[in-house]
Image (cartoon, rainbow, N blue to C red):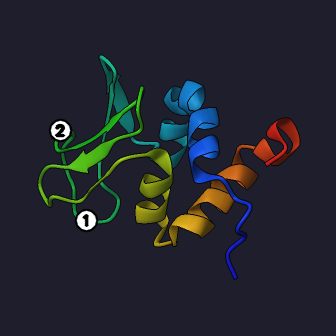
Amino acid sequence: MPNPLLDFQALQQQMLPQLASIIPQLLPDGMMRGCEYIALNPKRSDRRLGSFKVNTRTGRWCDFATGDAGGDIISLCAYLHNLSQHKAALYLIDKLDLSRRTGL
């Protein structure tokens, strides 16, 4: 059962300053261009950089070839790992060791 005390908005806010380092962990085969991280989409046969982008300031992401998109890093993690939003949030908390540093 989902933890009703998990504050997705607070988690997102705490991750915002770290997005430039979190995103390459989720999508290791990419590169920065301005404030966007451009990567291959591991969910499809993506051969060239360009259509899958993540904004490193906001976490908004989109695959312009498929139309898949989301508004934050939690939804990106959920998309990439086939997780629910709740499980993606817990995954990020664990991966980034946020539970000890933030009290989440």
Q: Position of residue 9 (x, y in %)?
A: 56, 46
The residue drawn where x is 44% and y is 56% is 75
Q: Nearer the viewer, residue 10 or 80?
A: 10
Disc 2 is placed on an element classified as: loop
Question: Which dot marks residue 73?
Answer: none
With respect to residue 24, does 69 lie above or below? below
Residue 44: assigned label: 1
Give neighbour class at mark 1: few <14, some 14-19, many 20+ (Cα, 10 Å).
Answer: few
Q: Amino acid at mark 1?
A: Arg
Q: Where in the figure is residue 29, as x and y percent of width and height?
A: 40, 42
**Label 2 packing within 10 angstroms: few (<14), some (14-19), many (20+):** some
User: Measuring 65% from the left and 53% from the top, which residue is drawn there?
Assistant: 7
Name of the residue lying farthest toward the right: 100
In this view of the protein, can residue 56 be seen by the observer? yes
> What's the distance in space between the residues labelled 1 and 2, CA to CA?
14 Å
Percent across and percent down for residue 34 are: 30, 16
Amino acid type at image mark 2: Gly
Residue 94 relative to residue 43: left or right: right
Dot 1 falls on a residue whose secondary structure is loop
Reading the image, the residue beneath label 2 is: 50
